[in-house]
Amino acid sequence: MGATASHLGKDLLSEYQELTFLTKQEILLAHKRFTELLSREDKNLPDPRAPTEAILTLPELKSNPFRERIVRVFSTSESRDGLTFEDFLDLLSAFSDSATLEIKSHYAFRIFDFDDDGTLDENDLEKLVNCLTGETDETRLTPDEMKQLISNILEESDIDKDGTVNLSEFQHVISRSPDFVSSFKIVL
């Protein structure tokens, strides 16, 4: 399903539209934006990969506290560095207004699962809270506040009481949060 960075054929454009929650216009705009992230040399490769540093300069990600995790989760490279155009489309599709709650919650869970073990444990939750509150001395929670907050999160979310939140528990919590879908988006 690869495309050169300089051209998107009609068939490929239709295929991308079928496989994503994006319109043809959004795909074309995404292609333009992706191509702008590539070096001159990379633009001539058959399946170029935009480097993470370039992706993180996008205004839509620049101020997102999870920007590095987002790139890591959507990257298909073994090193989890950089994105192909298809990775970039997957990212934009998952964050689009048209993506389903199931898709959005699946990717949100993966982004919040900092150790990539398939569960949100106390360490993941602490990193999540620190990302959301900022890690400055003024905004950082005290150890007691953090412990209480994580305890509250687990009390509310950990249905099977195993000390972690799995994907289905996370999706259950998200399903009760109508604001989640509207806040989990990136608009080009």
Image (cartoon, grey):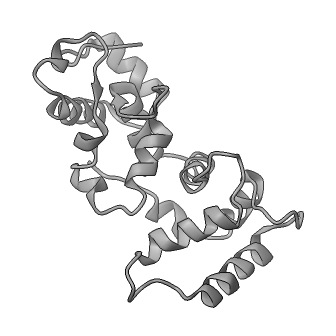
Of 184 and 123, nearer the camera is 123
Image quadrant assignment for residue 91: top left
Query: Front-most of 89 and 134?
Result: 134
Residue 82: tell me if it is visible. yes
Residue 126 x %, y %: 59, 70
- Indicate left or right for 160 with 107 as reference: right
Q: Residue 50, how many percent across, how many down? A: 27, 31
Residue drawn at x 71%, y 62% as measured from the top left: 121
Q: Is residue 138 above or below residue 51?
A: below
Give the left or right position of residue 181, taking residue 11 as reference: right
Q: Give residue 186's position: percent from left, percent from top.
A: 35, 53
| Residue 165 on image: x %, y % | 75, 61
* Residue at the (46%, 83%) spot, across then down: 140
Q: Quadrant of residue 65?
A: bottom left
Residue placed most toward the observer, 87 or 54: 54
Of residues 183 and 159, which is closer to you in this image? 159
Q: Quadrant of residue 125?
A: bottom right
User: Which quadrant does the N terminus fall into?
Assistant: top left
